[in-house]
Each structure stands twice: as C-alpha cells, then as structure tokens.
Amino acid sequence: MSAEEHLGDDWPTMPDGSDFDGTGLFDLVRSGNSPFVWDGFHIQSSNRPDVVARLANGDVNMPHFSGFSIERQVEEVTFEAAAYELLRSEQNILASKLLYHRAPVQHSGPKLATPQDILGRRLFVLERTEGDNNVWRGLSPEHKASLITQAAQIRTSLFNYTPPSTFTSTWFLPRVFQQRPDSLSVPVAPTREFCIALFESKIEATIKNIGDVIGFEDDEEFVGPRAFAAKQSLLRLIPHIFPTDGNQAALYRLVLDHGDFGIHNMSITTEEKGHFVITSLYDWETGCIVPAILSDPMMIVTVDIRTDGNANAVITRVKENATSEDKAAHALWAKQYLDALFRHAPGYRSAIQAGKDARHIWFAMRDLRDEDPEEFYGGLGDWAEIRLKELGLGDDRGT
C-alpha cells in the first residue's frame, strides 16, 4: 500500500501528544474545529436515553481510499442492522438496541480533497447500556472467571437460538466468506443435503479451472495443477464427511454466529456488591449464518480461545513475550469458558466433534491469509487424499 492510500483516520492527539480525551467536543464541532469525525461517542441528553454513536474511521470519499468497497460496506451495515432488529427481544443474547443506522454514500466524480461531510462513513446510533468495554486487564482472576462464565451463557443462548427462515434465506449466501458462489444449487435449509451442496458450491467458486484467478483479483494468483487436483480430491471427499446418523436436526439446523465474539465487543458494569456484569453485545458486522456443525465458538479475551476437531481448547494469538504465568492464565480461561459453554449447550460439543473434517476444510479456507494459494490448496488436497484412504475410498487423484 502506498503512503497516499487511505484506510482510516488515526485517533487525534492533544498538543502534548496524548490521545484526545473528548473534552469540549460539542463546542469544537460547532466551531468547525472537531479533531476527528470517527469512532464511538457517548452522547448524554437531558430528556432522552443516553446513546452511543459509532462512526467509521474510513471514508469512501477520501482521496485514494483503499478500504472495503462501498458494496461490501453497504452489505455489512444492512446485515448488522438486521441482526440488531432480529435479536431485539432475545434478552439472554443481550444484543444492543439500535436506534438509527446509515450506510456510507459514495459521491460521484473524482476524489480530490478531504470530504467536508461524513456521508462516506457508516453510522450506527445505539441506546447506551451501563458499563464499559475496557475493564478486562485490571480485573482479579475471580472477576475474570465470572465474566467468562457469563460470556459462555450468552454464547449458549446465541447457539441455541434459531433464526427465522426468512432471515436465513436472505442472509446466508451474502455472509459466506470470499470467494463465495453467485448462487446455491439448492435452497437454504437445515439439512445434510444443503451442507453438501454448500461445500461443493464453495469449492467450485474458489478453485475454478487451471489459469483462472484464485483468491482476490489484486493478488494476481492463478489456479495451477496442484490446486486443481486438490479441488477434485475435496469434491470426492465432501459427500462422506457429513454424518448420516445421530441427531440430524441438531447438527444441521441454522444458527447465527457473531463473528467477533469477545470481551472487546461487550459492555461491562459493576453492581453494588462489586460483581462485574455483561450488559450488552455489539458489533455484529462480521456475523454469519452457518449450519450448527460449522458454528465457531471462538471467544476473544487477550488471546483467542478456540477448539480443535475434538472440542478441546486451542489458544491462539499469544504474545511472544508471554510468561509461563500468562500461559497458565490463558489455559484457565479456556477451561472456564468451554466448561461453561458445553455444560449449558452439550449439543455444541457434539456438533464440533461430528463436523471435524468439514470444519477443517471450512475454517482452513476461511482463515487463509498470506499463503501461496497453489501450495495451500495443494496441501489441503493432500490431506483430503489421506482422509479418502482412511475412509476406504481409494486413490484416483488426477484421474
């Protein structure tokens, strides 16, 4: 990215170099001297509920803007607003109450100067709940354990919640990660057949024919023989990795995943007796709808708490300088979270274990970042061939 390209604004600073603290913001705005036009603001009024305004730090009308496209931003804003509205009456999920939202508007013509308005930024106005979201680091182990347990209960409620079919049929495909198919060969449904069709469509959309673009256009990567062979192996394997026994309704029902579930997206307050309580869950822009067998229980604290294919804890994003005491604390948080989650939602553990192979493929493709696509998918194809042999399905790769 060149020095001229614009992703988003930096947080403004005071004359002494410290971060701007918000003092006198309204007066600065009225005088035309606002130090910034982005992030979240807590606005107190005399006769109405307090609100929080979230204004994006990226403006699509900024010269050399290189952030997400206007189409993607409009989709994310519309989906997030729909999620807030959907969950408004679901008290155990604690989704914030949305009062107003606006997608960014892209002005016509060349982008030559910094915009004098904020129409190019996504905007959400939400009713403010009591609490803050930056309290984690200063808490005692007991208070952290309490919050982790509460978060697990919220995650349980979200996993157990079944969105209406109108919502899932509208939003399933638009929330599939790139590269997504243009359409699905069968209607969205909570069935094994739909899962198979979804995987086949996703593989076909991602790995086309030799010489076609693979990944994003700007990456200038193309399908080679290894990736193309991997495609054939994966397509052969897919019909065999979705269980035909067990509780089919529980495994294939459609659920709403938050996509960025963690302490950083929760409001937390303190009650009179000193107990810390989660009061809201917000920022649903990366949410998606998935079959339960693909639902991701990840919980973000200062590390990411994940699960492997057997529903055991996996901790990622650990700092290089983490001490043995830090790592012991991370392991404890993971145990506390997953113990509470699976205690309240035993079906979650079963779904993870039943979908071991499917989840391996899905999450590997979802989390692909800087790897060489030809080598990455070639390796995934090698894994698929091993699984085919283990399932007694032979080896006809490349035929």
Image: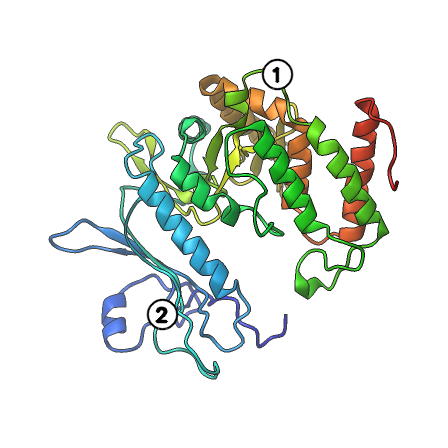
In what quadrant of the picture does the N terminus appear? bottom right
Picture coordinates of residue 392, whole percent (x, y):
83, 22
The residue depicted at 34 percent of the width and 40 percent of the height is 86
Tell me: 12 left or right of 98: right
Residue type, mark 2 in image: Leu
Residue 119 has which mark?
2
Coloured how? rainbow
Q: Is tag 2's residue or tag 1's residue first in the polypeptide sequence?
A: 2
Of circles 2 and 1, the one toward us is: 1
Q: Residue 153: percent from the left, percent from the top?
A: 41, 26
Element under disc 2: loop
User: x, y percentage for residue 61?
Assistant: 44, 74
Task: Rate crowding at label 2 as few (under 14), some (14 to 19) or many (20 or more) other CA atoms within 10 Å.
Answer: some
Query: Regarding mark 1 in the picture, which secondary structure is present there?
Result: loop
Quarter holding residue 229: top right
Residue at x 87%, y 42% (from the top left corner):
398
